Amino acid sequence: MGLFNAIFEKKLNEPGKMMFKLTKDQAVSVIQNSVRNNNVGAEFEIILFYAGILLQHANNMKPNKINQIQEDYFKELIEYIKKNNIHHLIEQDIGDFINDRFVLYNEELIRISGGGGMAMPTKLMYNIVDSPLEPNSGENFDLGKHMLIMGALMPGLKNIEDSVKIIIQKFY
């Protein structure tokens, strides 16, 4: 494949764009298959949920490249935020909001993975269904909605894990 082709291919297939598209497409799929409330807030919440997972997998694979991987991903996330005016919809600093959500969603994942199938991601559901983009998360205990949304979210986790592995191996 030659050096010129390798450089040209990397520019055409920027890994940040590929990683962001992966999380956005999964979020859109969840909304279409479960939430049915196609609002940008719910989509953004799901993107952040998936982004945390994507970046954790990337860090596990290439910890020495995680800064570059994060930079590539966040360039695209910031473009999405600007394009959709999300920074105007959130009542706090956007960086703080994103960091808080990463912490919250990581805690939710730890809780449900250690709950033996009994724990529910009540805060994630609240942020997706009841009140997207609110700084403080409430809790949603609607079992029917949990089953519907988790049924749509879970395949995306596996897809992200498999796809990010290919992206990271190819570009980093």
Image (spheres, rainbow, N blue to C red):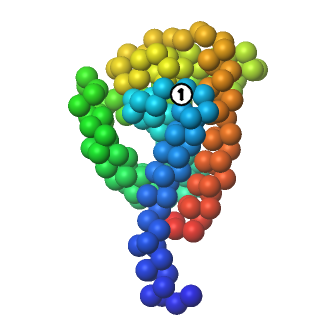
Q: Residue 56: image x %, image y %?
A: 55, 44
Looking at the image, residue 113 sits to the left or right of residue 101; the answer is right
- The answer, for residue 49, to whether it is visible in the render is no
Looking at the image, residue 44 sits to the left or right of residue 85; the answer is right
| Residue at the spot 76% in from the left edge and 20% down from the top edge | 116
Q: Nearer the viewer, residue 70 or 11?
A: 11
As drawn, 46 above or below 22: above
Q: Residue 120: image x %, image y %?
A: 64, 17
| Residue at the spot 52% in from the left edge and 90% down from the top edge | 2
As drawn, 53 above or below 5: above
Q: Which residue is mark 1?
A: 36
| Residue at the spot 56% in from the left edge and 35% down from the top edge | 32
Q: Secondary structure at mark 1?
A: loop
As drawn, 96 above or below 18: above
Which picture quadrant has residue 156? Answer: top right
Q: Nearer the viewer, residue 3 or 77?
A: 77
Say what amino acid the circle numbered 1 marks: Arg
- The answer, for residue 135, to whether it is visible in the render is yes
Q: Nearer the viewer, residue 51 or 147?
A: 147
Image quarter hosting the N terminus: bottom right
Q: Residue 159: image x %, image y %?
A: 65, 48
Which picture quadrant has residue 84? Answer: top left
Q: Residue 151: image x %, image y %?
A: 69, 29
- The mark total stands at 1
As drawn, 6 above or below 77: below
| Residue at the spot 68% in from the left edge and 39% down from the top edge | 155
Q: Nearer the viewer, residue 156 or 65?
A: 156
> Mark 1: few, some, or many residues within 10 Å (few <14, many ≥20)?
few
Farthest bottom residue in view: 2
